[in-house]
Structures are given as C-alpha cells and as structure tokens.
Image: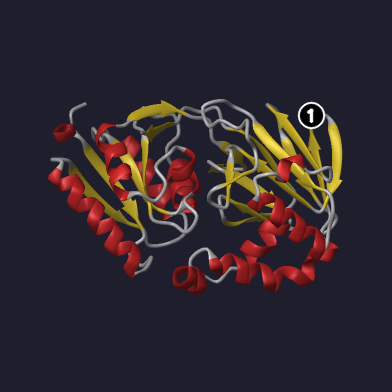
Amino acid sequence: MTEDARRFLIIHNPVSGSRNAKRLSKVLDKLEKAGCGVTLAGTEYAGHASKIAAEAVKSGENWSAVVAAGGDGTISEVASGMTDTDIPLGFIPLGTANVLAREVGVGTNLQKAVRTLTSGKAVEIFPGQMGDQRFLLMVGAGYDSLAVSELSSHEKRKYGALAYIFAAVRAVKRFKSLDVRVKVNGEDYRGASVIASRVRLFGGPFTIAPDADLCKPGLHVLILKNRGLWAALKYGAALACNRLWKLSSVDYIRTDGTVEILSDHPTPCQFDGDDGPETPVSLTTDRRKLFLMMP
C-alpha cells in the first residue's frame, strides 16, 4: 500500500501527560506530511482501548492499521481487542520502557515509528494469553510484580524508569516471603519469582530470553529460585549484564504448552509492565491471528 493511501486509527490516553502529548503531536504531524489519514480515539477508562479496537476491526472500515499510542500495557490492551483480523496492530512508543518497540528495532525513535507505520510490513506474531487478556511481552509473579504493585502513576510520569526503582524499594519487605510454584512441561518447579516471556527483552534493553521470537509460538520461562533482598540484588545485577538466564539459581525452560503459576498465598502478577490478577494464573500461546507492523 502506498503511503498516501494509508489510514490509521490511533488509540491513545488523552490524560497520559504533557510529554506524551507533545511526542504524539510530532508523530501526527509527520503522518500528515506523509499524506496519511489519521483518526484519533481517546480512552476514558481501563479496558476502553480493547473495546475501541474490537469495534474498529468489526466496523468494515479499511484501516491500514489500528495503532496503540502509549506504553507496552496500552499496546497489549489494544491487541486484546484485535482477534482474528487481517488489520495489523501498529504502535507509537510513548511509554516508560517501550520493550516491544525495542524488541522489533524501533526503540523510542519517533521517526522510525512513523516509517514503520508508513512503509513497514505486517508480520504475523503469536501473543501470549492469560485468561481473556493477551500479552505481547511477559507475565511475572515475584520480584517484578511486587514492584509493579507498588508503582505510583504520578512517579512514573514524573521520573520515568526511576519510578520502578522507588517501587522496588517499597516492596523489599515482602521479598523474603516470596514463594511461587510453576507447572511447565509436566514438571513442578518452586522458587521466589517467575517470568514467562514471549520476547527476548525485559525492562527495556535487557535480555532475559535470548531464543524468544514473537513470530514463533511458545513461552520462555525463567524461575528465580532464591528469595530475599540479596538474591534480588544479585538477580538485578545479572539482568543488567544480560546474564540472568545463565545463573545456576535460575531455571530456564521453553514450552509450547501451558504454564501454571501458583502460590500458597495470593501473589500479584504483572503483565507487560501493568498490574495483573493474583495467582493462580494459567498462561499459553494465543494462536488466533494477529499481525504487527514492523520495520
């Protein structure tokens, strides 16, 4: 499709902050200069992005892409509304970590994001599935999910990635009591924390699952066996050095089947960096059709 024929429905949160509004405005200006047609749809409540996306793909409109403008959680929310459609999912990276954008080589570069929409290709991918929710990146229960549960939206807007460090400090007192059970490939595992990932990256630029590929089904599961503050610091240092999956205290398993995360006491989960349900949860690959705009 030629650039001037492209029509985009862009779903965004109109109260996400002035910085995001400025970045979105730059993208809209670039799309208009490229001759693209743009329709904006603002969200009003949690889950609204999924509803807008679902209505868009059923409307019969000839959208070139339904575009999520926001962070990874917003992109996943839009993806949850786009089941079994040939209309691709696009994205404008306006979040804190922007893991998906980094995963596919766009990063936070707005010019690359615009180029991906105007001249990129639609590639079939396989999201994860947790209940009736899709996730494009990962689900975690343990160190990461406790930090996300303590996250302040005000701090996130003001401090960006540093907000996760502040949240982790507030969650430290709960690290000693972490205890999760994981069932995968017919085996039972136990540890302090678990991450089931569809992608290579975590938290931005850090590699946790080097063999993961959005274009291939399957979950890559990391079980962090040791608990407590010192264990968390060790895991954090290994993550920063892109060596987390290599540690002897980490089990790294790949599966095409179901992953069950359980615990004796309810533990909050995070999916794609947002708050999720408490354990127990069941995860699998969603094989319903989804196309993603890629460079």
Q: Can you say whether 255 is above or below 235 in the image?
A: above
- Judged from the image, the secondary structure of the residue bearing numbered disc 1 is loop
Q: Is residue 251 left or right of residue 102?
A: right
Residue flagged by tag 1: what amino acid is it? Asn
Q: Quadrant of the C terminus?
A: top left
Q: Which residue is mark 1?
A: 185
Determine the image quadrant of residue 232: bottom right
Q: Can you say whether 121 is above or below 268 in the image?
A: above
Residue at image point 67% right, 39% down: 283
Residue at image point 79% right, 44% down: 247
Q: Quadrant of the N terminus?
A: top left
Q: Is residue 155 left or right of residue 228?
A: left
Disc 1: CA contacts within 10 A as few (<14), some (14-19) or many (>=20): few
Residue 188 at x, y = what percent?
86, 38
Residue 128 at x, y = what percent?
58, 37
The residue positioned farthest toward the front in the image shown: 241
Determine the image quadrant of residue 292: top left
Residue 44 at x, y = what percent?
37, 62
Residue 203 at x, y = what percent?
57, 52
Query: Can residue 268 be seen from the camera position used here?
Result: no
Q: Can you say whether 146 is above or below 205 in the image?
A: below
Residue at image point 13% right, 40% down: 35
